[in-house]
Structure formats: structure tokens, C-alpha cells
Amino acid sequence: MTSDIKTFTCTIASGASLSDAINLRGYTPMTLIMPGTWTAASVSFQTSSDGATFGNLYYLSTLAVTEYAITSPAADYQIVLPPEIFFTGATHLKIRSGTAGSPTNQGGARTMTLVCREF
């Protein structure tokens, strides 16, 4: 049986660092497609299990809790997301330009595409 694939988009507004929320209910992220223009910055995430309260996405790595961030993505990159991190228990997702400790405002509206599979 093959899983259905669905794409979602979200936008980081010009002068902002955090996107609007994506409702992932029933889907698991597989690939992040960066926009054709991107102000240089890492990418990190916020997740929510209720769509109202969001928290920064961290994972356990070698017994240390680390913020999950994609460093130095470029415009038009298609980034495969590791299924063990994305996004157990999360029903909603926001994408951040930069990290929690160092958000980076984008120089224009940036729309990202998230390719997901049904679970």
C-alpha cells in the first residue's frame, strides 16, 4: 500500500522570522523545499499538539537535548527531513528563520513547501 503525498505551504512574512502554522494532522513531513529567495539563516521549528501552544523543537542526541536546526540551507534546496525527529506527537508546525536563540528576519515574504506523507 502506498501512502498519499500532500504538500503544505507556509510563509514567513517580510521582516519576520517565524512562519504561519501548518496543520499536519495525519501527515509526517518528509522534505522541506526552500524558496527561490532566502536571507541566509539556519532553519529551525516550533511544534504544537493542539495548534495553540507552540514550543521549540528539540531532540535527544547523545544524551543531550539539542535544538533541531538545519544549518546553511540555500535558496531552492530540497532538504530531506529525518523521520525520527519529524514530528512525533506534533499536529501543527511553524518554520523559523534562524534558531530560538538567534532568529533571523527575512528580507521579504518567503514561502516554503513541506512535502508530507500520510500515516
Image (spheres, grey):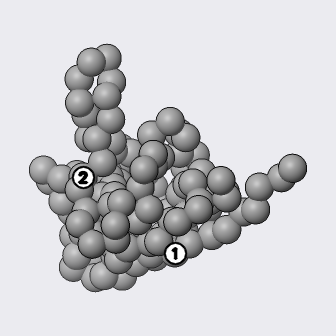
Task: Tell whether 106 sits left or right of 119.
Answer: left
The relative height of residue 100 versus residue 63 in the rendered view (above or below) is below
Q: Which mark lies nearer to you, 2 or 1? A: 2
Q: Quadrant of residue 6?
A: bottom right
Tell me the amino acid under the disc marked 1: Thr
The relative height of residue 105 versus residue 27 in the rendered view (above or below) is below
Residue 82 drawn at (x, y percent) = 53, 39
Tell me, for residue 56, which label it has, or none.
Answer: 2
Which residue shows up at 72% across the image and 63% down it? 5
Task: Tell whether 59 sits left or right of 64.
Answer: right
Residue 43 drawn at (x, y percent) = 35, 54
- The reply to whether residue 110 is in sight is no
Q: Secondary structure at mark 2?
A: strand
Question: Mark 2 and mark 1: span between their CA atoms?
Answer: 19 Å
Name of the residue lying farthest toward the right: 1
Name of the residue lying farthest toward the left: 101
Is the residue marked by circle 2 packed among few (<14), some (14-19), or many (20+) residues within 10 Å? some
Tell me the amino acid under the disc marked 2: Asn
Residue tagged by mark 1?
Answer: 9
Which residue shows up at 41% across the image and 55% down it? 90
